[in-house]
Amino acid sequence: MASTLIRNIKSLYGIQNKPHSFLKGEALSVLNHIDNSFLFIDEGRIIDYGSMAECPERADEIIDATDSLVLPSWCDSHTHIVFASSRESEFVQRIKGVSYEEIAESGGGILNSAKKLGNTSEDDLFISASKRLEEVMAFGTGAIEIKSGYGLSFDSEIKMLRVIQRLKAAYDLPIKANFLGAHAIPTEFKNNREAYIDILLNKMLPYIAEQGLADYIDVFCDTGFYTVEETDRILKAGAKYGLKAKIHANELCNSGGVQVGIKNNAISVDHLEQIGDEEIEALKNSNTIPTLLPSCSFFLNIPFAPARKMIDDGLGISLASDYNPGSTPSGKIPFL
């Protein structure tokens, strides 16, 4: 693999001289950078950087970055880019005043996507997801998490996770697979949700773990979806198979999702459009990362998570796109 020297960089951003977990509070306002700088890459790894006064003279490839900025690529930690087709008709419903919850209760939303995905082949899903992945890469995304959750059956959830594995093999960027079988209760289990949870815990999870199809496990813990108690059971079951927790929490109401996520050592609790002082205090005393999805608020016309209050109260936050076929049809982080 050849060496690459990027020289005459106007400003090199994202300088971190020592490892850290994640930044919090006032630290988020500090953007370390070096003006008039270089970046040297060898064998695919950054091995040196600094001011042009210290710049190496030779490399296999030299890029002149005069008048340009260089910064790390985006890490999009919450996406649903494997899906069969978009749900633009629901935007018309929302314009007419129908809420997200009402659409979901009538068989739209996630259940609509699950129906479409069940009738779509793995190859077609891979082709369409590849196009979306290439699109977000062109806008600067260099690492991404992709969830299942539009399957809601053994065969379809496994199909989605296989597509994510194919994307991992086909593209040169870090991709994490997240098993979100607990995204909604399938229509056929509406009156027997425990039967579906049993399939999730005792059929899907063992197979997924055996085949190495997922890195994380996720649950939609919110009104009309999964309860705190159900979420706790599912996350604990995932932990037994080595799957780290990442959950949807507090999008539609103050659901208790933050607390159950922290209890299960979740890497992150995502959404948080509805959050109070109690949840903020709990997050301050944990290693769980609050992840906000402002594009979701924009497209659904629901409240935005109180990012400034959370930062001023000492929290670190992460932003992610929530790219999906219904509530957030965009993975463009510059827009986010």
Image: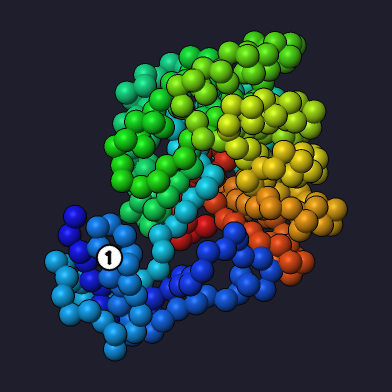
With respect to residue 155, does 310 lie above or below? below
Q: Residue at 52% across / 75% down in the picture?
A: 31
Assess disc 1: are there few (<14), some (14-19) or many (≥20) residues with their C-alpha within 10 Å of its C-alpha. Answer: some
- Residue topped by disc 1: 41
Q: Residue at 30% across / 77% down in the picture?
A: 38
Q: Residue furthest right?
A: 278
**Residue at disc 1, secondary structure:** strand
Q: Residue at 60% across / 37% down in the picture?
A: 244
With respect to residue 267, does 128 lie above or below? above
- Is 150 or 243 nearer to us in this picture? 243
Q: Is residue 60 left or right of residue 328?
A: left
Q: Position of residue 146 (x, y in %)?
A: 48, 38
Q: Give the quadrant of the N terminus.
A: bottom left
With respect to residue 69, does 225 lie above or below? above
Q: Is residue 151 left or right of residue 309?
A: left
Residue 175 appears in the rendering: yes
Q: Residue at 36% across / 47% down in the picture?
A: 173
Which amino acid type is shown beneath numbered disc 1?
Ile
Residue 128 appears in the rendering: no
- Is 214 or 108 nearer to us in this picture? 214
- Is 326 or 170 nearer to us in this picture? 170
Q: Position of residue 216 (x, y in %)?
A: 56, 35
Instruction: Indicate the quadrant where residue 7 lies.
Output: bottom left
Q: Position of residue 178 (x, y in %)?
A: 53, 34
Give the image's coloring scheme.
Answer: rainbow
Q: Position of residue 175 (x, y in %)?
A: 42, 42
- Is 44 or 152 nearer to us in this picture? 44
